[in-house]
Amino acid sequence: MPHGESYEPRNRFTAWMDARLPLLRVMHESFLTYPTPRNLNYWWTFGGILTFCLAVQMITGIILAMHYVPHADLAFESVQHIMRDVNYGWLIRYVHACGASMFFLAAYIHMFRSLYYGSYKPPREMLWILGVVIIFLMIVTAFLGYVLVWGQMSFWAATVITNLLGAFPLIGEAVKEWLWGGFAVGNATLNRFFSLHYLLPFVIVGMVALHIWALHIPGNNNPQGIDVRQGKDTVPFHPYYTVKDLFAVSLFALLFSYFVFYDPEALGHPDNSIKANPLQTPPHIVPEWYLLPFYAILRAVPSKLGGVLIMFASIGILFFLPWLDRAKTRSARYRPLFRQFFFLFVIACLGLGYLGAQTPEGAHLILARILTFYYFAHFLIVLPLLSVIEKPLPVPKSINAPVLKGAGAAAQ
């Protein structure tokens, strides 16, 4: 397809539609001839991978909802019924359960890529903010879905997390009791969580549409972190990046399939295979792995209200990132100091994930507090300071310059 080819209706029906509802034109310009920087690497394919994961979660979730019973006495048994009696129910359930982990894995990689290449900087602030909203909605949706299994770990995770809401002054108790539907986690709680878990994915789809819209206004960022010239520095999204994304999705699907078919319980907790018992508290309550960093931050603060506020602040601070990092250079390729602190930040996040699965005492608690401090210091101290003191490397004038320079060196 020639670069920049405009949409032309091919028959009378498409011409009639184009004059009244130009959906085909929008799709053509947004996903086929959309000008995309020609130097995007495979880190940019995680947007397509996330779309694939969202579609998988939506389809499998709707099928599971047809067989699931949101009742405290029947929820756990209905999951077992899906696994044992529904045709390929085991496959649908494992794809949905493992799909949540794959969804978060791709989302976290997508976010770290944005942090490394400065995709949150002007003029893409709204794109970043919408992405943070999507991550927050994903966390809430995943937590609600985790509770629906109504296993031992699910029940007590719901009890612990919802109890934390009561720490908020004035409105905390009212919000907690509304979520519970009473004065303890029970049948009404399960009904509310099921309703919200079914609803929120459709909200996420709407936010993803806004996210894509916000992307198409300024256009894609690129590894060089510089503005591109349409035509000279860009290619149509199709077929160049559709093929590249399809290849990346295929590789990701292999990893996905490994967990589904060979080790589906590896990413969960064995206690969740036991039916919820309100009279028996597990010795150590642990959420799913993708929530562990936030859980570690929550427990690092001795105050109940302080821990809740810090946990929400760990997400809330991301909204202000475009204004905390005032450096003009976007890509970490040309910011050597930032690059070092970025990798320290990644290590801190991984460390918090590990500590979230450990008991909050002794050295584990001390280290969690140190890493929590560094997490916030990275945004509030390191980035503003680097914006002032760091001297970036020379940035090329076009995305072709580094390639042409390397080709010239090779020829010599």
Image (spheres, rainbow, N blue to C red):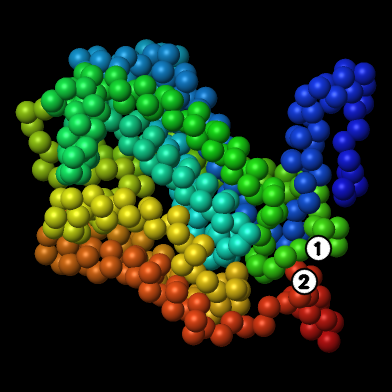
Determine which quarter of the picture holds residue 155: top left
Residue 151 visible? The answer is: no
Q: Which residue is mark 2?
A: 398
Q: Nearer the viewer, residue 284 or 394?
A: 394
**Percent of width and height locating residue 254:** 54, 42
* Mark 1 crowdedness (10 Å alpha carbons): few <14, some 14-19, many ≥20: few
Q: Which mark is residue 402?
A: none
Mark 2: few/some/many CA within 10 Å (<14, 14-19, 20+): some
Q: Amino acid at mark 2?
A: Ser
Residue lying furthest left: 279
Q: Amino acid at mark 1?
A: Arg
Question: In the rendered structure, are the residues bearing label 2 and label 1 in contact, judged by CB atoms less than 8 Å apart?
Answer: yes
The picture places residue 278, in percent across and down from the top left corner, at 11, 27
Which part of the image, by quadrant, shows the N terminus?
Answer: top right
Please tell me which residue is depicted at 65% across the width and 49% down the height of the picture: 215
Can residue 267 be seen here? The reply is: yes
Say left or right for 242 vs 261: right
Which label's residue is closer to the chain start, 2 or 1?
1
Relative to 159, residue 194 above or below:
above
What kind of element bears circle 2? loop
Q: Residue at x 81, y 49 (%)?
A: 236
Residue beneath the point at 79% across and 36% down: 28
> With respect to residue 202, does 99 lie above or below?
below
Residue 321, position as x, y percentages in the image: 47, 62
Q: Which residue is mark 1?
A: 229
